[in-house]
């Protein structure tokens, strides 16, 4: 099976900013067949570059600011995002810049999917908002389905549900 | 002198950590406004740590910053260990120093290579360097990967270390792993010198600005201090870390939600340049050799040289990490079980921990009750200690640029480069994307 990695981005000390980390850690505890890598990337944007290098397929989970209700999620490809907008990352490099650099260096995985989740709020708080906590099983289900379908596409074992 | 109206308005300065604005207005050569504004929400450190157990605090505080997570963990552990009266072994101390070298290298390579080099190359970001300077960029990426590998090996993972615990390590690397790392470090000198060559070639792009200020860092008679020591100021000399509140004197300003700090003067600087100014003689000979190529000697008052001080420190980090591994292997690694838990007798008390993190001196201060529950906490981060110095540099630099008939674009770039030279970490930690989809 092609090397598949699930990367969580965010900070669990800042409320819903940690949704990416929470989902990846929860998924790791589920029955996912071997061969899938799980990484808590945290908030250091440029480090994503190094994780991407070793992957053929990457699923990146992050909080996104976009139109919609808290807890809504969307899977998209980096190429679908308007790269001309000023992306306001609070970090050394934002996710899209790291992916762009990965491509420029010839290291980009063949496939990248970003699961973006709309946060309710991001104050100093070491747990998700009630709105996102309520949505957690649904979000986890979506992430799991995506990862399982990618495993199946690659001809890997299907986990027992 | 320019009699034009100057209006520099940089919102969300790029290539720094967090959200900061630069505002400069001038009319007929007279400055009307000159402000470094930090608009990040305050981080309420106290609320994060109060009511938490001594076993948990270092895990929680490691998440304050995605870049300095090892440094926050170590400052936290040192504060907890000081409060609870816990001693660690010499071996654990050496391994912790190795972890700090890894983080310093990681952060400095990222800053010099990905964030400052584009300015020197005349590019808006690191991406164009992939086609204009592919070999140089590959060198930077290799060095960054090596530092990540080093922190993975010592701490269990690249960020948010898991193996660092009160009293020592839950797991230590093997002698084989240390040897392999040492080989890689030895092989990295060519890469380091290639980055130094590139910076030297472009060094004239750093503005020749200078403003006398105070520099504060840890200092230690035994070594170039990162892990332990006392506080040294170029103005007021050496004091114990327990007096940190009298040194840092944090205060609130109207233009910013972040705190500012002052000691002997109205501002001071922390970070690589402060460490180098205070502890230059203890740098490794190879690191000093790099400093000499840039005529960087103590006491240097050009904040732009912080970029070069970072480069010098990376060379020192690699050299000293090689020496530490030699010492560990010569002594023979004292074996310990996996998932090791040091014996800690909980007691009531207060402890202060200070370490040098990439951006400067960091203090954690905790008070615990008899059950080992934190009842109060304080944290003074390096970036807050630098804000006042950035502001005062801008107040000197902006009129000088206007006096020299620099245009708005050049003024803007010089001010942006000034702020970036401090490598400020403003938000320490939210991460989300603003997403607009292509129609």
Image: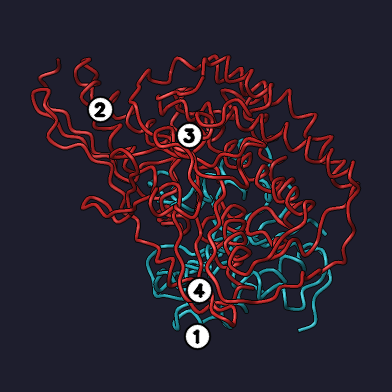
- The residue that label 1 is drawn on is A134
Chain of the residue under label 3: B
Q: Are callouts 4 and 1 both on one chain?
A: yes
| Chain B pictured colour | red
**Residue occupying the point 77% across, 78% down:** A31
- Could you tell me how far apart the alpha carbons at marks 1 and 3 are, in whole angstroms? 49 Å
- The answer to whether residue A37 is left or right of residue B302 is right
- The residue that label 3 is drawn on is B274
Across and down, in percent, residue B337 comes to 87, 66
Of mark 3 and mark 2, the one earlier in the sequence is: 3
Q: Nearer the viewer, mark 3 or mark 2?
A: 3
- Could you tell me how far apart the alpha carbons at marks 2 and 1 are, in whole angstroms? 53 Å
- The residue that label 4 is drawn on is A126
- The residue that label 2 is drawn on is B396
**Residue occupying the point 63% across, 39% down:** B105
Relative to B228, say whether A23 is above or below. Answer: below
- Could you tell me how far apart the alpha carbons at marks 2 and 4 are, in whole angstroms? 42 Å
Query: Mark 1: which secondary structure?
Result: helix
- The answer to whether residue B306 is left or right of residue B395 is right
């Amino acid at each position: 099976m092609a090397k598949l990695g699930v990367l969580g981005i965010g900070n669990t000390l800042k409320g819903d900013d940690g949704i990416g980390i929470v989902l990846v850690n929860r998924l790791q505890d589920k029955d996912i067949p071997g061969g899938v890598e799980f990484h808590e990337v945290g908030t250091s944007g440029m480090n994503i570059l190094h994780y991407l290098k070793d992957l053929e397929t990457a699923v990146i989970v992050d909080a996104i600011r976009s139109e919609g209700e808290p807890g809504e999620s969307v899977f998209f490809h980096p190429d679908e995002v308007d790269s001309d907008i000023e992306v306001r990352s609070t970090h050394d490099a934002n996710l899209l810049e790291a992916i762009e650099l990965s491509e420029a260096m010839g290291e980009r995985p063949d496939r990248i999917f970003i699961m973006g989740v709309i946060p309710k709020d991001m104050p100093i708080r070491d747990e998700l908002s009630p709105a996102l906590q309520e949505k957690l099983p649904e979000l986890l289900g979506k992430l799991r389905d995506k990862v399982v379908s990618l495993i199946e596409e690659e001809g890997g074992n299907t986990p027992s549900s | 002198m320019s009699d034009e109206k100057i209006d520099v308005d940089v919102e969300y300065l790029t290539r720094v950590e967090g959200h900061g604005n630069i505002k400069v207005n001038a009319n007929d050569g007279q400055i009307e406004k000159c402000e470094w504004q930090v608009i990040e929400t305050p981080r309420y450190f106290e609320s994060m740590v109060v009511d938490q157990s001594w076993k948990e605090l270092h895990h929680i505080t490691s998440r304050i910053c995605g870049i300095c997570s090892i440094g926050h963990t170590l400052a936290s552990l040192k504060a907890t260990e000081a409060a609870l009266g816990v001693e660690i072994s010499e071996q654990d101390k050496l391994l912790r120093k190795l972890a700090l070298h890894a983080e310093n290298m990681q952060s400095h390579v990222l800053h010099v290579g990905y964030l400052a080099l584009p300015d020197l190359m005349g590019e808006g970001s690191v991406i164009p360097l992939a086609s204009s300077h592919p070999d140089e960029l590959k060198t930077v990426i290799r060095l960054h990967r090596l530092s990540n590998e080093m922190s993975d090996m010592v701490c269990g993972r690249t960020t948010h270390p898991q193996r660092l615990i009160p009293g020592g390590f839950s797991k230590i690397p093997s002698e084989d792993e240390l040897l392999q790392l040492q080989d890689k470090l030895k092989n990295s000198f060519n890469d380091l010198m290639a980055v130094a060559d590139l910076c030297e070639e472009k060094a004239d792009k750093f503005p020749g600005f200078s403003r006398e200020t105070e520099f504060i860092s840890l200092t230690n008679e035994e070594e170039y201090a990162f892990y332990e020591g006392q506080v040294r100021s170029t103005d007021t000399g050496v004091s114990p870390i327990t007096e940190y509140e009298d040194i840092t004197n944090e205060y609130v300003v109207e233009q910013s939600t972040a705190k500012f700090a002052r000691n002997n003067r109205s501002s001071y600087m922390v970070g690589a340049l402060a460490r180098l100014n205070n502890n230059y003689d203890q740098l490794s000979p190879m690191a000093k050799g790099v400093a000499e190529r840039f005529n960087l000697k103590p006491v240097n008052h050009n904040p732009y040289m912080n970029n070069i001080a970072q480069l010098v420190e990376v060379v020192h980090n690699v050299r000293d990490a090689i020496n530490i591994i030699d010492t560990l292997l010569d002594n023979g690694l004292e074996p310990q079980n996996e998932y090791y838990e040091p014996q800690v007798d909980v007691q009531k008390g207060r402890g202060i921990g200070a370490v040098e993190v990439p951006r400067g001196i960091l203090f954690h201060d905790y008070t615990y009750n008899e059950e080992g529950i934190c009842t109060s906490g304080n944290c003074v981060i390096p970036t807050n200690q630098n804000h006042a110095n950035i502001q005062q540099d801008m107040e000197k630099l902006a009129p000088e640029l206007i006096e020299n008939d620099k245009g708005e674009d050049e003024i803007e770039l010089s001010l942006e480069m000034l702020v970036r030279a401090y490598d400020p970490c403003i938000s320490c930690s939210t991460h989300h994307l603003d997403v607009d989809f292509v129609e």
